[in-house]
Amino acid sequence: MLSLDFLDDVRRMNKRQLYYQVLNFGMIVSSALMIWKGLMVITGSESPIVVVLSGSMEPAFHRGDLLFLTNRVEDPIRVGEIVVFRIEGREIPIVHRVLKIHEKQNGHIKFLTKGDNNAVDDRGLYKQGQHWLEKKDVVGRARGFYQENISVEDRNYLFLILEL
C-alpha cells in the first residue's frame, strides 16, 4: 500500500512541484558523491570508509563495525598495523593485521597479514603463488573505527574512536 500512496502523491503534483522534487533528489545524490570523492582525495584511499564483514578480526573489530582508512604513500607499513587489502580476482577487500614485513635491499617492501581470530596467516587467501602482499594491494590503513556494541552492558551506547 505504501508504494501506491507514493504514486498517488506523485500524480497529484503539478509539473513544477515534480521538477522541484527531482531536482532536490539530484542535489542530495550529487552532494553525497562530492563528499565521498572529497574523502577519497583527503585520505588517499579509494574507499575511505569500509564495513567489517567477517569475524576474522575479533575481538578488535566485529561484523558491522566501520573503519576509517587513509592510504598515504609516504607512510611506511608497520608490523601490527591494520590494513585493508584487495586480492586479485576477489571483489571484496579484506581487513587484517600486518604480521611480518620483508624488505629487500632495494627498499621494496612486502608484507604478510593475518586475522586476529585466525589460526594461520593469510597465504591461503592470496592468489596462487603469491606469498606476500605489496603496497599496491593496500586499499587503506585503519586510522579509526566506529563500533556499536562495545560490551553487553553498554549495548545502548555508540562510540567513535579515532586515531589521528
Image (cartoon, rainbow, N blue to C red):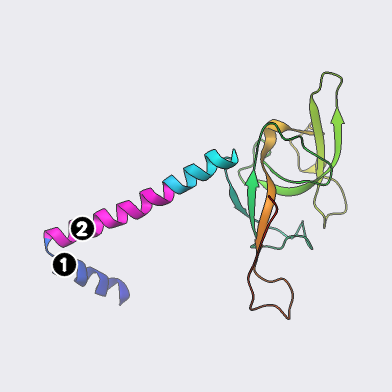
Q: Secondary structure at mark 2?
A: helix
What amino acid does circle 1 point to? Arg
What amino acid does circle 2 point to? Tyr
- Asked if 38 appears above or below 24 in the picture, the reply is above
Residue where numbered disc 2 is placed: 20
Say the numbered circle drawn on residue 156. Answer: none
The image quarter in which residue 56 lies: bottom right
Q: Position of residue 118 (x, y in %)?
A: 83, 54
- Asked if 72 appears above or below 19 in the picture, the reply is above
Q: Nearer the viewer, residue 3 or 104?
A: 104
Q: Which residue shows up at 63% across the image and 78% down it? A: 156
Task: Decide if residue 77 is on the left or right side of residue 67.
Answer: right
Residue range (magenta): 15-33
Q: Which residue shows up at 43% across the image and 47% down it? A: 33
Q: Which residue shows up at 15% across the image and 66% down it? A: 13
Q: Which residue shows up at 87% across the image and 20% down it? A: 105
The image quarter in which residue 112 lies: top right
Q: Secondary structure at mark 1?
A: helix
Q: Position of residue 162 (x, y in %)?
A: 67, 56
Residue where numbered disc 1 is placed: 11
Q: Nearer the viewer, residue 24 or 12?
A: 24
| Label 2 CA crowd tier, 10 Å (few <14, some 14–19, many 20+) | few
